Image (spheres, rainbow, N blue to C red):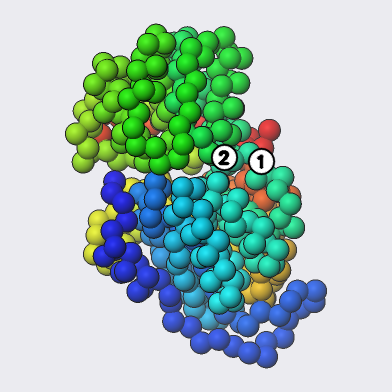
């Protein structure tokens, strides 16, 4: 789990744009604005910052989806175009808006990203008011459900109303009664901690310590000292890459690694870290069920081919792949690649109709005049009026001595209640 290298970044930016010939003069059905016949996607993903470890699986998900779409004939008979820009993180708030400006000026129809809910807040008004669809694979903040986005914002990851409840229940199920919480002071951290805390307290657990830290914090000695002094029998850590600083401090103070609970922002492969054996028995949650092995292997092979590096993280790979598939199917159903047309068809292609799980099958059904219901690798999805997936699963993982999280089970639930 390493930050995106400059060499890798240069390689990514060199290959993310697929070649396509734009068409003009296409007939378009009312009431949509006219598209140009080529689906143009932009990406605003964390190539730098505390979430940079998440960008490889997200990039791999986009690349593989586009490869599968183009192999099936493309959208509206043309290859999909794809341009990637950096989002960084909440500690660098000027980067994502600048990237959004560049992509909007270039005429993209939809934007994939941002990864972090807080970063999405920096660009969502800019993107959606331009009548460009924004879809995130990993935004989980509950308040994004009711954002005034005009119907242009969607996400394939469930709200933290679900993850917060499930991680809280996991802690209680483990027999823990005195829980400490360390969380990132960001929209992501604050939204998740609120739901987890409510679940814990409703189940009779006591929150003995609740300490926050600013995004990209590097010194956790004081926070860890206070946490250990509180006498907790378990610890919930809500963070991004900062966990690589938190874990060694906890180990040094003798807090049992098996009593740590993680979440999607820090459930990662830590085999390269010195504290890897310390995490044995620690548990964590991640939206989605068990990752499909064929998807995983194909994405890893394509990523190695494109960028010359192995794919070691797979969080949100499935959600990213499905996000691109839904955009493509919506444009194909509308027979129009404009943002307005895509937005108007996203709910339709994800609910009701004939179930399809590949772009090729969806394309064939649409051409046959059928309504479709795309069910992807991340689950049934089924967008509601707020652009949220109404039903979802949260995977439960546990660490071994090698620092790798191992899938245990998936817990299903409703993500919007």
- Classify residue 223 by image quadrant: top left
Q: Can you say whether 102 is above or below 284 in the image?
A: below
Between residue 148 and residue 26, name the one nearer to us.
Answer: 148
Numbered tag placed on residue 3 in the rendering: none
Q: Residue at x 28, y 58 (%)?
A: 5
Q: Position of residue 334 (x, y in %)?
A: 69, 71
- Count the marks: how many? 2
Q: Position of residue 54 (x, y in %)?
A: 39, 50
Task: Residue at 72% x, 86% y: name it.
Answer: 27
The answer for how far apart the CA atoms under marks 1 and 2 are is 9 Å
| Image marks 1 and 2: residues in contact by CB distance under 8 Å | yes
Residue shown at 54% from the left, 71% from the top: 103
In what element is the residue under mark 1?
A: helix
Q: Which residue is mark 1?
A: 143
Apparent side of residue 54 relative to residue 275 in the rendered image (left or right): right
Q: Quadrant of residue 244?
A: top left
Q: Residue at x 41, y 65 (%)?
A: 63
Q: What quarter of the picture does the C terminus occupy?
A: top right
Q: Residue furthest right?
A: 31
Residue 203 in view (yes/no): yes
Horizontal relation, residue 176 to residue 389: left or right? left
Q: Can residue 361 be seen in this snapshot?
A: no
Which x, y percent locates residue 148? Answer: 74, 52
Give the residue at mark 2: 187
Instruction: Judge left or right: residue 79 versus residue 122.
Output: left
Crowd tier of the residue under label 2, counting other residues whose Cα lies within 10 Å: few below 14, some 14–19, many 20 or above: some
């Amino acid at each position: 789990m390493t930050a995106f290298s400059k060499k890798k970044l240069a390689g990514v930016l060199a290959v993310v744009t697929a070649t396509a010939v734009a068409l003009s003069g296409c007939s378009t059905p009312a009431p949509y604005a006219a598209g140009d016949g080529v689906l143009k996607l932009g990406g605003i993903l964390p190539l730098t910052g505390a979430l940079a470890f998440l960008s490889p699986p997200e990039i791999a998900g986009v690349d593989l989806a586009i490869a599968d779409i183009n192999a099936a004939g493309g959208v509206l008979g043309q290859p999909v175009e794809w341009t990637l820009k950096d989002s960084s993180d909440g500690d660098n708030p000027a980067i994502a808006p600048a990237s959004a400006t560049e992509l909007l000026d270039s005429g993209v129809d939809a934007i994939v990203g941002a990864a972090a809910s807080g970063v999405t807040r920096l660009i969502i008004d800019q993107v959606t008011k331009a009548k460009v669809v924004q879809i995130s694979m990993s935004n989980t903040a509950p308040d994004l459900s009711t954002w005034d986005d005009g119907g242009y914002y969607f996400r394939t990851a469930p709200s933290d109303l679900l993850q917060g409840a499930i991680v809280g229940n996991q802690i209680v199920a483990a027999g823990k009664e005195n829980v400490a919480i360390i969380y990132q002071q960001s929209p992501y951290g604050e939204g998740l901690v609120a739901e987890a805390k409510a679940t814990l307290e409703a189940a009779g657990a006591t929150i003995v310590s609740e300490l926050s830290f600013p995004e990209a914090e590097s010194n956790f000695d004081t926070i860890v000292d206070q946490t250990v002094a509180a006498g907790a029998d378990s610890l919930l850590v809500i963070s991004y890459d900062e966990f690589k600083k938190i874990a060694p401090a906890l180990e040094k103070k003798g807090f049992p690694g098996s009593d740590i609970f993680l979440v999607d922002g820090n459930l990662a492969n830590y085999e390269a870290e010195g504290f890897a054996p310390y995490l044995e028995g620690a548990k964590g949650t991640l939206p989605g069920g068990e990752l499909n092995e064929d998807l995983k292997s194909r994405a890893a092979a394509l990523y190695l081919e494109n960028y010359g590096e192995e794919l070691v993280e797979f969080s949100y790979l499935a959600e990213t792949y499905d996000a691109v598939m839904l955009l493509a199917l919506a444009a194909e159903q509308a027979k129009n690649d404009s943002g307005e047309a895509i937005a108007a068809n996203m709910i339709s292609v994800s609910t009701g109709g004939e179930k399809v799980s590949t772009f090729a099958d969806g394309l064939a059904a649409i051409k046959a005049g059928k309504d479709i219901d795309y069910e992807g690798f991340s689950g049934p999805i089924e967008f509601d009026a707020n652009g949220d997936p109404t039903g979802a699963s949260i995977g439960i993982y546990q660490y071994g001595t090698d620092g790798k999280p191992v899938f245990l089970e998936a817990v299903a639930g409703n993500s919007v209640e």
